[in-house]
Image: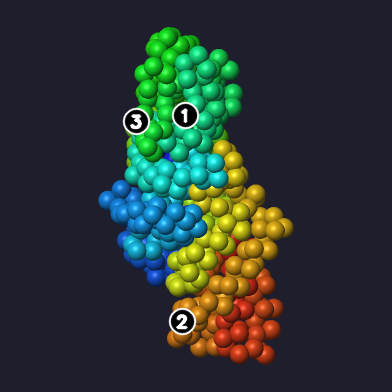
Amino acid sequence: MSARLDELLSPLASDAFDASAAEHLLTRVEFGATPERVAEACEAGLKPTVAGLLEGAAAPFDDSAQTDLIALGRLDLAQAWWLGRLAGEGGCSVLRERLTLIWHGLFATSQAKVQDLALMLRQNSTQRELALAPFPQLVRAMLVDPSMLVWLDGDQNRVGRPNENLARELFELFALGIGNYTERDVLEAARALSGWTVSGRAARCRERWFDGAPKTIFDETRNFDVDALVDATTSQPACARFVAGRLAREFVHPNPETDRVEALADLLRATEWDLGRCLSQLLRSEWFFAESNLRARIASPVEWSSRARRQLGGGPARLARAQAASRMGQDLFQPPSVKGWDGHRAWIGAATWIERERAALRWARDPSTPAAFADVERADLPAAVFARLLPERPRPEWAAALERDLDALSRDEALRTLVAATLCSPEYQLV
């Protein structure tokens, strides 16, 4: 590793990986941590814990339930199924599902236009399969994905009548960012993507519809097709920087330092897009655990729901949780635009905050909630609730005033009040 990488992505000292650091890691990677899981990570140590998370994300997975979902044809059930996986139900790797969600938000495609749940679930499966794959491989798969072709009119792109939608979003939103390409690059890239169509839910390139003439992209002239276009795009210096920025915003901070992002981009290039190795370096770095990065992100609705599920167990049924996440602003398989979700502060608005409060009340009233604290004495309820929902965090300032109001309530009412107040507290929204 170069001196620059060693300096900017230096590993956290092993003796600094305490319970607070473990809680931070697991909350960012697994959408939440129980005291038991924190203790397990501390016992194992940082490097083995991160290795275990990545091994789980790379292990074989089973998403055969998609077959039944396709037969039922109900988007809400598909959303509920995925939300269950995102909460780790059935032993799923939450990190793999988290990466799948990141790619869903990046290559944002919506059932609202595609109108074919089978295609949407196939794209979801592809993103899961390639969650840790080299980024160029994922880009190539998305450019010829049937739902993406329908979503961005790539299936209408013909020689002599180029449609620029997919090419433009490839550069602007998927791989490079504004300012790293020209309008001519977009037009020529559209020609390179011509000829693709969707037939019988499969993507294929019809030779007679493909523009086989030379194209000039990034100042290089050749007979570009989709493979050559992917190679040229992901070879641009801006691409590794773009992906590094995305990963840093998701795992470290909404506004990461430029030099750190560039160091992560250097690592992506040096490892030839070995995402597992890069995540291992990132998640073990002093940067990841820096004080300024702790509790710096606002949890998305899916993250909030999955965290509550992992910490409390049980909870409302998956369908109810998926519907609540949609009302809170994160409609799985239906991002609001080709930009995906803006995230962070955009998650909190007048209407969506009300929905978070309502969701917190539903969690508190669910019959499974008392079971999670069945062995706790009434006098110990506040400490037990805070320890489970806000582990390794300072006691909330509002806690004392709330506890005084619990005396007149029954044990169950006091417990529900504590859980609801914690789940909709400012502290719980920050991860």
Q: Of callouts 1 and 3, which one flags the residue occurring earlier in the amino acid sequence?
A: 1
Residue 428: image x %, image y %? 58, 64
Mark yes or no: residue 106 visible: no
Q: Residue furthest left?
A: 60
**Residue 384 or residue 230, whichever sits in front:** 230
Tell me which amino acid carries mark 1: Asp
Q: Amino acid at mark 2?
A: Ala
Q: Is residue 308 left or right of residue 119?
A: right
- Between the residue at mark 3 and the residue at mark 2, the CA separation in whole angstroms equals 49 Å
**Residue at screen point 67% across, 72% down:** 398
- Describe residue 298's horizontal placement relative to residue 166 as left or right: right
**Residue linked to disc 1:** 155
Q: Where's residue 122, x and y in %?
A: 39, 44
- Note whether 431 is above or below 58 in the view shown: below
Residue 325 figure quarter: bottom right
Q: Name the residue carrying label 2.
A: 371
Image quadrant of residue 230?
A: top left
Q: Residues within 10 Å of mark 1 (few under 14, many from 20)?
A: many
Asked whether 54 or 256 is in front, the reply is 54
Closer mark to the observer between disc 2 and disc 1: 1
Q: Which residue in the structure is indicated by mark 3? A: 272
The quarter of the image holding the C terminus is: bottom right
For residue 102, the mark is none
Residue beneath the point at 57% across and 75% down = 364
The mark nearer the N terminus, 3 or 2, is 3
Check contact, mark 3 vs mark 2: CB within 8 A.
no
Residue at horizontal 36 percent and vertical 29 percent from the top: 204
**Residue kind at label 3, given as amino acid type:** Glu
**Residue 122 against residue 240 in the figure, above or below:** below
Label 3 SS: loop
Kindly report the distance in space between the C-alpha atoms of the residues bearing marks 2 and 1. Answer: 53 Å
